Image (spheres, rainbow, N blue to C red):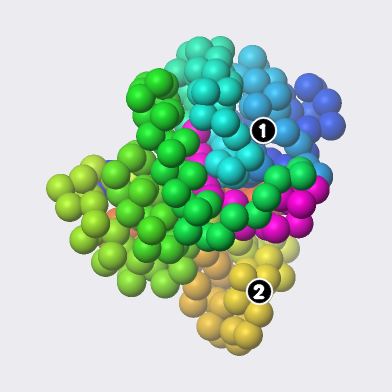
Amino acid sequence: MASDFRFGFSMRDATSAGFVQDEARRAEQLGYDVLLVPDHLGIAAPFPALTAAATTTERLHLGTFVLNACFYKPALLARDVQTLHDISGGRFEVGLGAGYVKEEFDAAELPFPSAGKRVDYLAHVTAYLAEHVPDAPIVIAGGGDRLLTVAARWATTIGVTGDLADRLAFLRTVAGDRFDALELNVAITAVPTDGSGIPDLKMTRRFAPDATDEELLDNPGVLSGTPADQADKLRRLRDEHGVTYFVVQSAHAEAFGKVIAELR
């Protein structure tokens, strides 16, 4: 597994080309490696926003974190991926997931398949992209056995959700010889932003509504304390689990920039 850290932040808004370009430049100035856009209805569309970012940067990588694969036909998605890969000079990383918000499928007038069928379709899309746009790195995020099995076969980077130690043990088994070459990712959902060292746990609690504050603070995706304390936690995640790629929300970008400075 790679030993060097990578850092990304996820941007949900794209109110103008100027705003996106400012965010991209801010990412570079703060030391981030990747600017990411998620794929949900009601926020910015990933490909136009990332194209605007590509035109104002030279070093920064760009990615989707993550596309709902069930929203796309493989050939049409491959066309978009190839175009952004070319426009960005090879800096685009295509992140994929199986989708999980039924209300978004309903709003898009698409059927909401079972979890197993959504993962099967993710595998179909991923295999097509790997064949037709082989130079674009594939990122897959999730935590279920079937999804991680797909990721183990095709992905360059895997965003792990759920019980980290358990999921990585499973991933090691299904990835076999590929495991050591994988880049492992954790999404950071809580970061102190006001100097108190105490993070806002609302986002994290959405995924673990019954957990206590103490349990949430132990979550790999939750940081607390000083920037040095937070950097120590990320070093432990790297040294104990091999996780080297961390993504924060854009609202955390400035505060987390201090953690990046501690690690570089």
Where residue 8 sits, quadrant-wise, is: top right
**Dot 1: what SS?**
helix
> Closest to the observer: 227 or 66?
66
Looking at the image, residue 169 sits to the left or right of residue 197; the answer is: left
The residue that disc 2 covers is 205
Residue 226, relative to residue 99: is it above or below?
A: below
Where residue 71 sits, quadrant-wise, is: top right
The location of residue 252, given as percent across then percent down, is 66, 53
Q: Residue at x 30, y 49 (%)?
A: 152
Neighbourhood count class around disc 1 (C-alpha, 10 Å): few under 14, some 14–19, many 20 upward: many
| Quadrant housing the C terminus | top left
The residue that disc 1 covers is 46
**Dot 2: what SS?**
helix
Q: Mark 2 vs mark 1: which is more N-terminal?
A: 1
The location of residue 156, given as percent across then percent down, is 34, 39
Range of magenta residues: 94-107
Kind of residue at disc 1: Pro
The location of residue 19, given as percent across then percent down, is 79, 29
